[in-house]
Amino acid sequence: MDGVTVPGQLEESLNPPASAPRSGRQGGGVTPGGLTAAQRSNLLTLTATGYMSWRVRSLSLLTGTAFGLQREAALFRARCAPQPGENWLDVGTSGGWYAGLLAADGARVLACDLSPAMLKVAARLERSHTIDYALLNAEATGLPDGSFDGVTIGATLNETGSAEAMLRESARLLRGGGQLWVMYLARNGGPSQAALSALGGLSFPDPAELPAWLPGMRRSDLLRVREVVFERWIKDGPVPDRSRPARK
């Protein structure tokens, strides 16, 4: 992936149908005991197998409007416009949906997740040769600074142990001019969210918190439909000169 090295050499492509994620050392020192209840549930084959059935309906159910994957894809492409040859990181890839969108637009994608079961499903659903899958802790990937032109985080922000750590790590991994696309459920202070936090370990950020968690970045877009929030952020700093060949 153009200079990106995954800890433990876990970047091996999983695209062939018979492939499965390597079972070597996990990036970032992830252990099941350190996961939230929601993250532990994602380790189950049953959860991974049924995830996309939920995903295709989730935003419509959560917003009370017709908000299918086609609408979400159009929103993402209109705001971020990924370009051929760019390097993107898809955090918490789950079924690989954002990774597949990026690959279809010609980007090279490193799709990471904490769940081997999710990675196996994603590799079966999204088989583009420009997608590599990795078992990584997105709060501390161990990847080099400035490795990516873009980062996508789709709902994983609510499930991780520290939303702040995940966002700070994503910002670190972006090059100057790189963009972060994040979708999450915002805090509403209601009893349902309180119960999900207590039982499932979910967290619900307030959009007002994100500027402090993303130093050196500026928010360019924010769209909120009920509790569902989409944001696009741009990293400050010089934009890499793409006219020069990449170092080997």
Image: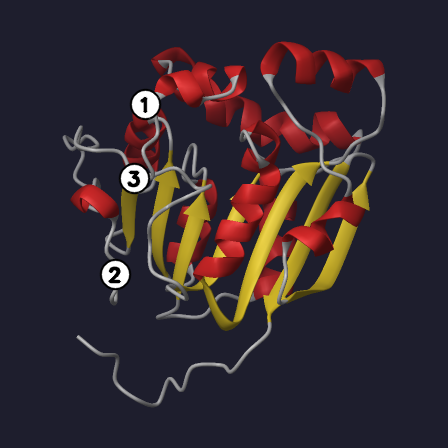
Q: Earlier in the sequence, mark 1 or mark 3?
A: 3
Vertical arrangement, residue 160 with respect to residue 224, above or below: above
Query: Quarter of the image holding residue 108?
Result: bottom left
- The image quadrant where one finds the N terminus is bottom left
**Tag 1: residue type?**
Ala
* Residue wearing tag 2: 1
- 120 or 4, nearer to the observer: 4
The crowd level at tag 2 (other Cα within 10 Å; few <14, some 14-19, many 20+) is some
Residue 27 is tagged as 3
The crowd level at tag 3 (other Cα within 10 Å; few <14, some 14-19, many 20+) is many
Q: Earlier in the sequence, mark 2 or mark 1?
A: 2
* Residue wearing tag 1: 117
**Tag 2: residue type?**
Met
Looking at the image, can residue 242 be seen?
A: yes
- Element carrying mark 1: helix
Query: Quarter of the image holding residue 159?
Result: top right
For image coordinates 69% across by 48% down, the residue present is 230
- 183 or 67, nearer to the observer: 183
